[in-house]
Image: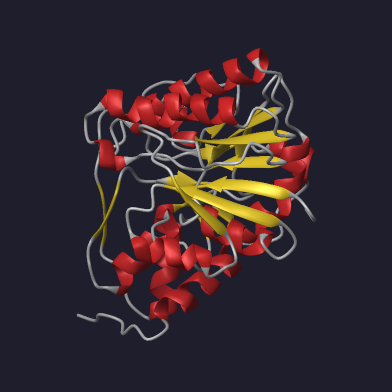
Amino acid sequence: MLKGRKILITGAAGNVGYPLARSLVQNNEVWGLSRFGNPAERRKVEALGVTTLAVDLEAPDFSGVPRDFDYVIHLSAITSAAGLDYQRAIRVNAVGTGLLMTHCKGARAFLSMSTTSVYKPNPDPWHAFRETDPIGDANLPGTPTYSMSKISQEAVARFCALQMQIPTIICRLNAAYGETGNGALPGRLFDTIRDGQQLVLRGDPNPYSPIHDRDIFDQLEAMLGAASVDCPIVNWGGDEAVSAQDMAAFFGELLGVTPDVVSRHFPGSQTGVALDTARRMAITGPCKVHWKDGMREMAEAHMRGRPVARA
């Protein structure tokens, strides 16, 4: 367990950043950097005991940001908010990463969070993507600029790691979830079913390798320990491949409803991303949270005080 370190988390109010900050602040000095467009989210992070910094990575001012962090966990990203503005997405996700790495070049390790959306779509929906598989435009409906801007981010991170000798690791995150992850994929699926709305999935099956935020925290130190100036790339997902259809059926059982699920074909788009996690397993060992156990906990958290919509 990380102890006594000075740690910077970008995106500290997000689905991954908030639970990480909550856990890390117990034994470390944690700083949270974000645009913090919503003041309530900043107060929420500060309530954990985290020192916050309001910085917009599209045009960052790092004048108030320390340089002496032991570790930097870079989670901030722009996704659907960029619309079709690819240049803006690249400025935030790629150029912003380079500027952050330059400012924090003295860190012991820098974790740059990427996404499994960087993989070129494969005709086999159950193909387990390896880190060496082809990358390309995932053509994701709703987030058209995301995959290409994150590919750009990976290139920038690899250059900065080598040029400035910053031990770095690129983690391609799959479907992270947990009790606080209201905006994460499994949480959105559950909320849609709970609220009696139709769930539209891109493909049947629509597989993922979901990972609970407790496993992310448990594996973080090992991931940081694997950082090097050669900038390894690691798939960060759970050990079990699960389709969104199976998640939906499980949520329906928990809620006592029959989910209204439809699948649509989006030409040229990823139908989902199941992972080969052998490289991650060699670094971190196996996950501890079974997907049904973790998602049951998540469902219970989302249900507190919320009625189920029934037909």
Q: Nearer the viewer, residue 242 or 53?
A: 53
Rendered location of residue 173, percent (x, y): 54, 41
- In which quadrant of the rendered view does residue 149 lie? top left
Note whether residue 142 is visible.
Answer: no
Q: Is residue 229 left or right of residue 36?
A: right
Q: Position of residue 48 (x, y in %)?
A: 57, 68
The quadrant of the picture occupied by the N terminus is bottom right
Occupied quadrant, residue 197: bottom left
Q: Nearer the viewer, residue 127 or 93?
A: 93
Q: Is residue 81 left or right of residue 189?
A: left
- Percent x, y for residue 104? 62, 32
Residue drawn at point x = 70 percent, y = 30 percent: 106
Q: How is the image coloured?
A: secondary structure
Q: Is residue 58 above or below residue 190?
A: above
On the picture, is 61 further left or further right than 209? left
What's the residue at 65%, 34% (across, down)?
110
Say above or below: 157 vs 107.
above
Q: Number of labelled discs?
A: 0
- Which residue is at the far front? 63
Whether residue 238 appears in this view of the structure is yes
Is residue 198 shown above or below 255?
above
Q: Quadrant of the C terminus?
A: bottom left
Residue visible at 43% across and 24% down? 95
Of residues 270 and 179, the one nearer the viewer is 179
